[in-house]
Image (tube, rainbow, N blue to C red):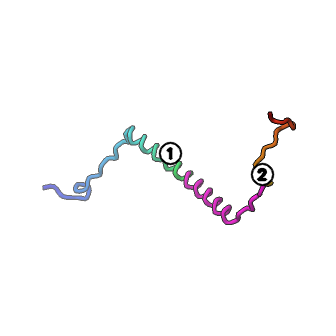
Amino acid sequence: MSKLTQTNVFPVSQSKAETPMEKTTRAVREILDADTEQRQIKTARLRKARRESEANPVAEVIGPATNGVRKTPGGKAST
């Protein structure tokens, strides 16, 4: 019998080359991760702005009251 050594018992497997599908998958995941990160940053920024605007309400501007009658332009009377 042959003598057992660490190299005989636990053979070192060769790292296989990355397949084209794995390359595509890796590229897509990188793109999606970057998009997700940008979306989360934007959402946090908008959420913060909304909370600040809700904390400091602006007084409503009330326009002149109208009685519902529309004036005709040029002073012409309707017939």
Q: Is residue 53 magenta?
A: yes
Marks 1 and 2 sit apart, C-alpha to C-alpha, by 59 Å
- Which marked residue is nearer to the observer: mark 1 or mark 2? 2
Lateral position of residue 37 relative to residue 15, left or right: right
Lateral position of residue 52 relative to residue 72, left or right: left
Within 10 Å of the Cα at label 1, are there few (<14), some (14-19), or many (20+) other Cα atoms?
few
Q: What is the number of the mark on residue 67?
A: 2
Q: Judge whether 29 appears above or below 62 on screen.
A: above
Residue 65 in the image, given as x and y percentages of width and height:
79, 54
**Residue sitting at x 59%, y 58%:** 44
Q: Amino acid at mark 1?
A: Ile
Q: Amino acid at mark 2?
A: Asn
**Residue sitting at x 26%, y 52%:** 11
Lateral position of residue 53 relative to residue 62, left or right: left
Within 10 Å of the Cα at label 2, are there few (<14), some (14-19), or many (20+) other Cα atoms?
few
Q: What is the number of the mark on residue 31?
A: 1
User: Magenta segment range?
Assistant: 39-63
Q: Is residue 36 magenta?
A: no
